[in-house]
Image (spheres, rainbow, N blue to C red):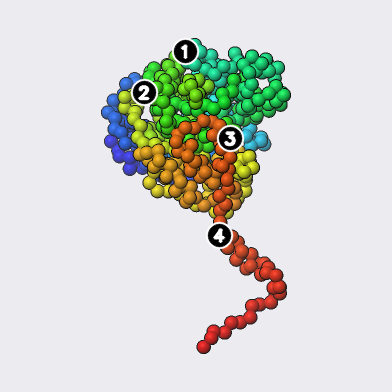
């Protein structure tokens, strides 16, 4: 068998108006040379026997994969595919024509020409067309955009293109959060009290709130990431909240369906990573605590949870597997729960049938490459083929992820945009960075999510992971745009965070997190001053324009 050092020559191409431009590129993988591979693990540092429990006729290797997304998650997909020897295809909007993900793939194609920046990535038929033109036989949707779109998954199935994720039927069941609630009820998994299905008007929401009591929360039936969610504290707020929730849901997910739930005041937000294959096996990769949130969007994630009651922890794992089995779940999914801080009761809230932004912390503590596992399952491999069974998956230490964004916490997390005049990233043992278009001179767009880079720290203990993250944040040098790094530093230093006794109102109820840590930025300011003097002359009061400095004579 050829070693992984065997190489092949391929061409990377970028679709431009005048045709394809080609550049030579070298790969090192046997599959690219047409050499068969043994059943391989998608986990790190683990060896698996070269036998398959899946019939060989059911295993169909992916020949080329397109990522229907942008930024860091597209780059994450391309890296995973390249390691497996799978050629990659990027798509990009006009606004992303200089985006880093475009140049990380072997080929890239403009989509959504003439459409708004977000709508470009929601153009299903354009993505399908690019698959056909490029010869991509598989699509990875990433997260956001079309990742939870059953119509998109269905179109892929109709065209014989593999959708790297659950089937369209499962997305209908789980991606649509009202349908997921119905499945949870039938499986005997506890849920938060809510409407029986989608609500069509603010009046219906008011009727539910009148019975359940305020506050309530309106949620988009599709999507996630804090988009399309509104907490309503009184009847007077309902009309505006309903309209804004539907509008945001339509803008970001292409579907304005919403539902309403009773709002729990101080819960923990805990989610369980689950994988299922085509042969009926389901496995959990333990849980993540995502309670540090602002506007329902996660800021810091931890794996595994700190100070979570072991009984509750086991029940979360069991209920996740119970629900996955009852639905015949396939590929990666995140089963999300709220845990009442006072009673320790847990309630199922939703399934995200896709890879999560915070999948990184689970990868660090389990050694399982979640994105590669998604691809291998889409090819037809079983979890057992990949060495992933409930008996073999183990946790190793703790991981913390911080989302470094171009937001100003002192201004209600208002996003910032502009050019990065300085960008220096941290490194060292136990630090991982997943970023998009981040380098000195890069332009941060105001058209998309404000995420700049994900910083992940891994260590044998939770305290050790926090210490590594603190050090990494100190090493960042980002100039030209405002970031939330000082805010994250305050979070990591707070006693409540270090204790692990968190809830989703931690940020809202802790004003000291917003205490500014001003950057001195002395070097950059000095350079700017010197450059100004060279170009514009001295600007000191009393200086005479055009007069050269007097000559200095050395003292004998």
- Disc assigned to residue 508: 3
Mark 2 and mark 1 lie on one chain; the one further toward the N terminus is 1
Mark 1 and mark 3 lie on one chain; the one further toward the N terminus is 1
The nearer-to-camera label among 1 and 3 is 3
Q: Is residue 408 left or right of residue 326?
A: right
Distance in Å between CA atoms under marks 1 and 3: 33 Å
On the image, the x and y values in percent for residue 84 come to: 39, 35
Q: Quadrant of residue 286?
A: top left
Q: Who's the residue at 56% across and 53% down the image?
A: 519
Q: Is residue 277 left or right of residue 48?
A: right
Q: Is residue 392 visible?
A: yes
Q: Are marks 3 and 4 in contact (CB under 8 Å)?
A: no
- Disc assigned to residue 382: 2
In this figure, which residue is indicated by the disc labeled 1?
Answer: 188
Distance in Å between CA atoms under marks 4 and 1: 60 Å
Q: Is residue 76 visible?
A: no
């Amino acid at each position: 068998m050829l070693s992984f050092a065997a190489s092949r020559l391929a061409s990377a191409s970028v679709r431009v108006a005048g045709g394809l431009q080609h550049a030579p590129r070298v790969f090192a993988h046997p599959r690219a040379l047409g050499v068969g591979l043994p059943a391989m693990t998608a986990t790190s540092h683990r060896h698996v026997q070269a036998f398959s429990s899946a019939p060989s006729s059911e295993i169909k290797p992916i020949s080329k994969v397109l990522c229907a997304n942008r930024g860091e998650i597209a780059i994450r997909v391309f890296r995973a595919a390249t390691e497996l020897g799978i050629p990659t295809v990027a798509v990009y909007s006009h606004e992303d024509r200089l985006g880093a993900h475009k140049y990380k793939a072997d080929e890239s194609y403009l989509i959504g020409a003439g459409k708004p920046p977000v709508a470009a990535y929601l153009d299903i038929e354009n993505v399908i067309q690019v698959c056909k033109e490029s010869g991509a036989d598989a699509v990875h949707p990433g997260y956001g955009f079309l990742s939870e779109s059953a119509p998109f998954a269905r179109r892929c199935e109709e065209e014989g293109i593999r959708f790297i994720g659950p089937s369209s039927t499962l997305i209908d069941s789980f991606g649509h959060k009202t349908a997921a609630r119905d499945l949870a009820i039938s499986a005997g998994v506890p849920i938060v009290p809510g409407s029986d299905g989608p609500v069509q008007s603010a009046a219906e929401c008011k009727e539910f709130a009148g019975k359940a009591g305020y506050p309530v929360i309106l949620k988009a039936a599709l999507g996630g990431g804090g988009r399309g969610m509104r907490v309503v504290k009184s009847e007077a707020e309902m009309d505006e909240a309903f309209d804004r929730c539907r509008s945001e849901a339509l803008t970001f997910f292409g579907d304005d369906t919403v539902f309403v739930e009773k709002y729990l005041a101080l819960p923990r937000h805990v989610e369980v990573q689950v994988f299922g294959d085509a042969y009926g096996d389901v496995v959990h990769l333990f849980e993540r605590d995502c309670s540090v949130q602002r506007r329902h969007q996660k800021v810091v994630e931890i794996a595994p949870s700190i100070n979570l009651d072991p009984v509750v922890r086991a029940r979360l794992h069991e209920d996740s597997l119970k629900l996955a089995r009852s639905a015949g779940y396939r590929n990666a999914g995140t089963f999300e729960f709220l845990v009442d801080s006072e009673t320790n009761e847990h309630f199922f809230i939703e399934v995200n049938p896709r890879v999560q932004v915070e999948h990184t912390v689970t990868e660090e503590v389990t050694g399982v490459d979640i994105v590669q596992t998604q691809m291998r399952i889409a090819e037809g491999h079983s979890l057992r083929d990949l060495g992933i069974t409930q008996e073999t998956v183990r946790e190793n230490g703790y991981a913390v992820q911080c989302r470094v964004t171009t937001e100003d916490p002192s201004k209600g997390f208002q996003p910032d945009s502009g050019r990065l005049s300085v960008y220096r990233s941290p490194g060292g043992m136990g630090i991982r960075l997943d970023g998009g278009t981040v380098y000195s001179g890069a332009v941060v767009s105001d058209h998309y999510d404000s995420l700049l880079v994900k910083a992940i720290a891994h260590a044998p203990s939770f305290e050790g992971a926090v210490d590594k993250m603190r050090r990494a944040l100190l090493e960042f040098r980002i100039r030209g745009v405002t970031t939330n790094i000082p805010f994250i530093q305050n979070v990591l230093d707070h006693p409540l965070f270090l204790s692990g006794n968190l809830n989703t109102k931690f940020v809202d109820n802790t004003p000291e997190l917003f205490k500014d840590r001003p950057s001195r930025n002395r070097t950059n300011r000095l350079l700017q001053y010197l450059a100004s003097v060279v170009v514009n002359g001295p600007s000191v009061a009393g200086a005479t324009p055009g007069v050269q400095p007097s000559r200095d004579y050395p003292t004998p």
